[in-house]
Amino acid sequence: MLAPCPARTPEALRPRWMGHFCGLCLELRDDAGHAARLTTNFDALALSVLVEAQGEAGADSRTAGPCALRGMRRQRIPTGDGPRLAATASLLLASAKLSDHIVDGDGLVARPGVAGLAARTADRYRAKATAIGGSIGLPVDRIVAAIERQQTIENQVVRGTPLEAVTAPTAEATGELFAHAAVLAGQPGNADPFRAAGEAFGALAHLLDAAEDYEADAQRGAWNPLHATGTSRDQARRAARRLLTDMKTALEAASLVDATMVRLLLDRYAGHAVAKTFGSVCASTSHQRPGAEPGRPYGPQNPPPGQEHSGYQPPKNGWTPGRGFWGGLCGFMVLCCTCQICCARHYVDSWSGQIREGCLRDGDCNCDCPCDDYCSQGCDQCCKDCDACCKGCGGGCDACRKGCDGGCDACCTGCGSGCETCNCNCG
């Protein structure tokens, strides 16, 4: 959910983001071994950022040596309890995902002989997470218990079950992790606001994951919370907006020394993730291909007969689908060593053959328009002139209103004074 967007990251903050990313990766290496670095997770960076935000930036830090994934440059990274908390979260998430794939019998674990290896890997990740979490006083047992309730709840879901009931275990586990960031920083007064923010964050991440996987799950007959509960896309979008607001409100109640990185990740990046999942946004439209649908920038999955070879075609210089685990692993190592995973605009996933975007690629969109996430005209139009999207947000919202599907709140977000200022009447 918190994948970095260069266009939305001020130049001065990019080294700080990279510092947290590298700090997490190196903490995983030191505490759980080199293989554990594969579990490095963007969302877990929020925990490292929250710990740092309650004290003086750079108070616990060191300079890391050169690394191929950052062009053999050195990097100042945070150290101590923040990265350890983030590492614990990354390992727990990786363990939970592997266990989920084993239960569903999908992905690589569906191959003969792989399920046993995946189960052992999941157990090892959980054991490492328990050890790291225990060293910082994190109640790992409570978090694991919440995660393990997920399968039981999913088995009980019927049409009409509230979506909040399905996302509750994720929300509870994430709330515990966020609250512990306050404990580690010696700011117990922030525990309750952080817990509330974490619960909203966890539920939002679960919801966005369900929305992104909806079509793929439907095609292969896999369980999806939106389909199982009968939640429409419009209902899911409104729920996501509410969770964003809840998270922002909770964080505003916390006492932070430096909230710069918190706002970047948990406001700007999170808001962009919601807009990218549910509608027109720079991230979707800037790379739009012929025949693409909103939220599916690389065109239709099943083109009409006779048009199989029209539109965008994947690059030919990557590993093709179906190479198997070891072939894919070799391809992954090549992608890492050549920095394509970080810096390439597009590369081909070595296992799935899907088109991916480098996590630190230079973006096409370089605009700071507060309305860009809701601009129906796409990144190019919005970034050339913010007035074209929202007329400056001060004298009407005609252009924005044409494509606004989120009501006045979504249309006029960023205007400062709501619909009264925007004169927006979206619906």
Image: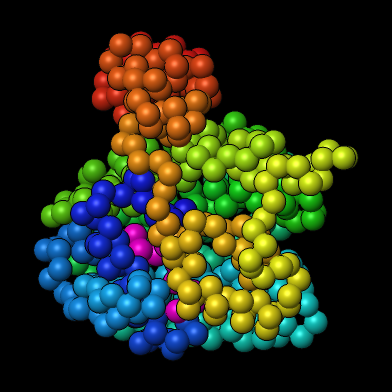
Query: Can residue 134 be seen?
Result: no
**Percent coordinates x, y for residue 46 in the rendering:** 34, 60
**Residue 204 in view, yes or no:** yes
Q: Compared with residue 250, is residue 425 higher up or lower down, i.e. above or below?
A: above
Q: Tell me what residue is drawn at x 31 percent, y 49 percent.
A: 9
Q: Quadrant of residue 25?
A: bottom left
Q: Position of residue 328 (x, y in %)?
A: 66, 76
Q: Is residue 42 above or below residue 350?
A: above
Q: Residue at x 73, y 67 (%)?
A: 321
Compared with 267, 184 (above or below) is below
Q: Position of residue 361 (x, y in %)?
A: 42, 57
Is residue 71 within the magenta segment?
Answer: no
Judge left or right: residue 120 versus residue 108.
Answer: left
Q: Is residue 248 left or right of residue 94?
A: left
Q: Please identify the quarter of the rendering in which residue 77 is found.
A: bottom left
The region drawn magenta spans 37-47
Which residue occupies the extreme right position in the image? 305
Q: 201 and 333: which one is in front?
A: 333
